[in-house]
Image: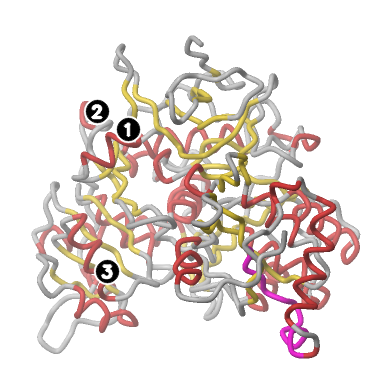
Amino acid sequence: MSTKIHTSFYPDLDIKPVDLLSYLFSNPAGTNPNHPLYIDAISGKQYTYQDVSKRTKSLATGLRQSFHLKQDDTVALFSPNTIEYAIVCHSIIGSGATVAPISASLTDSELYDQLVTCRARFIIVHSALLAIAQKAVQGTAAKIIILDGSPSTDGQLTCESMATSFPPDDFVKIPVSELASKPAFICFSSGTSGPAKGVIVTHRNIVANLQQMRDLMVDSGRPSQRPQRRVGLAFLPFSHAYGLSLFLCQSIQWGTTTVVMPKFDLDLYLSCVEKYRPDELSIVPPVALMMVKDDRLANYDLRSVKLIMSAAAPLGSELASALEDKFKKLFQTEVFCYQSWGLTEVSPLASATPNDRRDKRMLHVGRLAANMQLRIVDHETLKDVDSTQTGEIWLHGPNVTPGYFENAEATKEAFHTEVDGTRWFRTGDIGIIDDEGFITIFDRIKEMIKYNGLQVIPSELEALLLDHPDIQDAAVVGRWVDERATEVPVAFVVLKDQGLANRESLEVVTTAIHSWLNPKIANHKRLRGGIHFVKEIPKSPSGKTLRRHLRVALQNSKSPKAHL
């Protein structure tokens, strides 16, 4: 079959030829200089738009003058979410250097690997993580700079002290000719199925995607139908592409007041919704699940919420509907819960559901962003498939990144170049696109289970299991069975009532789940690998199920009795 290219439903945007900070601080929203931009959810401390601009420029000056930061340097940023995070992040970029945001959840050995991968010259560290960083930098070229606090007794400056003691100066400007090649970020992929890779996100990539994001979420001919994100609640890790894009970049450009949480805590989150009254929430599926199943929502006034966007992992339509129903029951409000889709390699947004097409929310991740193209390809033959068939989704556009930092092999595997020079990013996601441009994602290629040659989609089984009245959370992986020469699906299940398995035998509980599930699925999708009962499902900070951890657990334990 010949190449079949699907273009965005929306007209192309004129991507601005400017570097990231010129775009962010251009203040198109006309934000008042005294408008609060970042607020600490716990202490209430805040920085205004003017504070952020001034402190970022002062810190950029301090990094250049005191630490001789150069334009070809990479600086790792290792910190939990704080109201200083954006200032530190953009001061690095404002110095002409590249920032590598690193998850605060890493161990010292994992941090070491990422410092080596991105060739960090410095690592800016929050004091709470200093001990981990001190172990991790041994054997690397990275030198430590403390993020918070006053200068040390030996006179070493901290980012906090530099942000208040150096004069603000203009940011380093990136020439237009370098925007498509100069990295603003090296973002580490979540590594749910293997070691994390450093994704090169250029100035053009992120500026293009911020424009695409605004077009999808606010413009596109329907500005009156969507809230304007007056307030955002940020528990998403700023080191993750989702949190970075929304709260370190979009918030500044839109003038959104961002209430910063160091990590997710349900009571703190709900109290912030009640206090700051956001019209839209940005969450991940585990938080959606918690909100549906936890009775504490009734203790708070959440009536300001009109939209709930979920991303970073698949959101089942049943879970989305359950969350909408709960808001309607508790607060008598109509809430639209939808999902957007993206990957770090597309900076990160690729699609979202338009607010005026709520009928398409149930099975889809929305329409492709402006300026993007999409193909559905057989991942084995690399040939485009018929429009009625599923296949691997390939993407092309100004937000598609150049590849992985100093990893030619991984770049070649994930980015396919056609004879005419067009580069396509192979997402690894299996999906389909309909005649109206709405995309459906079924699962990752690497997560698909083949039972006797038939496909089993883990996310489909997980969504069904979450509907079971006794199940709090669930994940499904494949296990190879030599005697059958095939994979079989295995479920890991968290029970709502942890004592249930003690009061009833595991065999009774297991049989009950099979009896409930089997009539709802085709024969080849049955959990022939059995069911494991666990206390929690391992997940990344962004909410993705870490299936590789579950596979390791399978290798280290006896498999439950198979149910045929």
Q: Nearer the viewer, residue 231 or 268?
A: 268
Q: Are marks 1 and 2 in contact (CB under 8 Å)?
A: yes
Residue type at the position of mark 1:
Val
First to last magenta residue range = 491-502
**Residue hosting label 1:** 18
Residue at the extreme front? 483
Q: Position of residue 357 (x, y in %)?
A: 76, 33
Find the distance from the CA under tag 3 to the CA under tag 2.
33 Å
Q: Which numbered disc flags the more N-terminal residue, 1 or 3?
A: 1
Q: Is 457 positioned to the left or the right of 464 in the image?
A: left
Q: Which mark is residue 492?
A: none
Residue 306 among those drawn in magenta: no
Report crowding for label 1: few under 14, some 14 to 19, many 20 or more residues within 10 A (C-alpha).
Answer: some
Q: Nearer the viewer, residue 122 or 27?
A: 122
Going 71% across and 54% down the picture, which residue do you hit? 526
Report crowding for label 2: few under 14, some 14 to 19, many 20 or more residues within 10 A (C-alpha).
Answer: few
Residue 496 among those drawn in magenta: yes
